[in-house]
Image: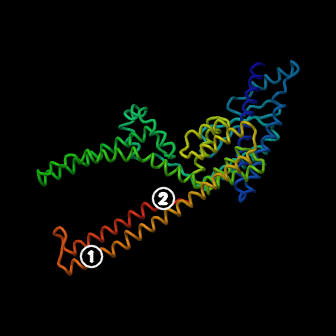
Amino acid sequence: MILLEVRMFEELKKNLLLEKKIVADISSVQFGLQSDSGNRNLYLSSIDALKRQLILLNDTIPELLKMPNSEDEKKKLESEKKKVEPEKKKEIGGVESVSYSQGVNSKGKTFVTINKKDKKEFMEKLKFSEGALTKIKEIKKKSSGEVLVKPSAYVIISNKFFRKTSDKLSPQFVSLGKDLKKSNSRYMLTSYLSMAIMSVMLSFIFGMIVFGIFMVIDLSNWKYVAAPFGLSGLVLAMFYMYPSGEANSVQKLISQELPFVAIHMSAIAGSNIEPVKIFKIIAGSEEYVNVAKEIRKVIAQIEIYGYDLVMALKNVAGRTSNKDLAELFSGLATNIATGGSLKNYLEGKADSFLVDYRLERQKYSELAGTFMDVYISILIAAPLILMMMFIVMNVAGLGMGGMGITTLLMLSILGIAVANVVFLIVLNAKQPKV
């Protein structure tokens, strides 16, 4: 009898675990419904199927908790239990234990106990909901445009040879690790250091090969012995400086999106929606690519690491590359903790960000005007004057440093072309991205 009671409670535990999963699936589908109205019917039918499964599972609980009252009932249940083979489906009163596989790629089976009369309906709803959830996942994957990026062969080889070395060196490059996180790099610090070591060694080997070729051509080329060291040093410097440069670029891109994100969030907050859902809506938007990456970090802190929203906001605020976004997250954390009005706070921040946005645009307009004046002076007026000077020199038969007029003219044209390229690079670097 004790064994029978233990088995009943085990069956009940399995049912409750399944109900917990179904509730989580319903929550996920409801969130998807808010951001994807085009597939509304699919979401609603999936929710109905999941709710029906909950009802059928709840109807099983009284049967599982029903205990035999007389000795005859006990003996009858014990005899029925002995007759049932372990491989076959086990029956307890009016319920039946069934198994099914969750998903196409599932290797294990899930066991659940259901009323006999509800078994057919439960399995139909289960099959429908599993198919609907698969379709919803595919829709989300296509709409987000996110793909699983596997490590490249270069990363794998670098880690294979230098992982132990990079593990020892990583405590000395804490700031580099922070820059990698701020730049939203997909590389861990140890993997990045392994690639850096690998690249430095390859560049040194390449430099030695080039030096050897020069020595074969002429022994007087021994002065190029510094080439391998210079090349490897240049590669090392590039690896060290790249994360900070990328983090700075991300910081500027976030600044361009932040005013509009704050306006969008304040509009959503006006409908008294839950704060977590506000962040999920912004994270699912395609308009704010860079801010969405930072907000996904907040959601990951909540859903994966189990932090509450306030703690998640504070954690991400300490790691983001943009000071304004860090201030926004910290302010939101304080506002949520104290029960303040999110709408009023976000509206105030949106106004502040818009003022900064307009000032930056005005500053860029003034800078563009200065660039225009410099460009006209150096690359339009100066070449004309230089051309007139060359004509006078040609008539007078003069040269400069032994170079003829033709050589001077070609060098001038080359200098003008290089100056134009430099101007374009600087102007593009200063130009706002949005």
Q: Which residue is mark 1?
A: 389
> Whole-percent x and y of residue 424?
42, 64
Residue occupying the far left of the picture:
219
> Whole-percent x and y of residue 288?
61, 54
Q: Is residue 205 above or below residue 392?
A: above
Give the mark nearest the N terminus, 2 or 1. 1
Which quarter of the image is occupied by the N terminus?
Answer: top right
Which label was assigned to residue 234? Answer: none
Cα gap from disc 2 to disc 1, whole angstroms: 35 Å
* Label 1 CA crowd tier, 10 Å (few <14, some 14–19, many 20+): few
Q: Which residue is mark 2?
A: 430
| Amino acid type shown at disc 2 | Lys
- Residue 427 in the figure: left or right of residue 217: right
- Residue 393 in the figure: left or right of residue 98: left
| Amino acid type shown at disc 1 | Met
> Whole-percent x and y of residue 88?
70, 33
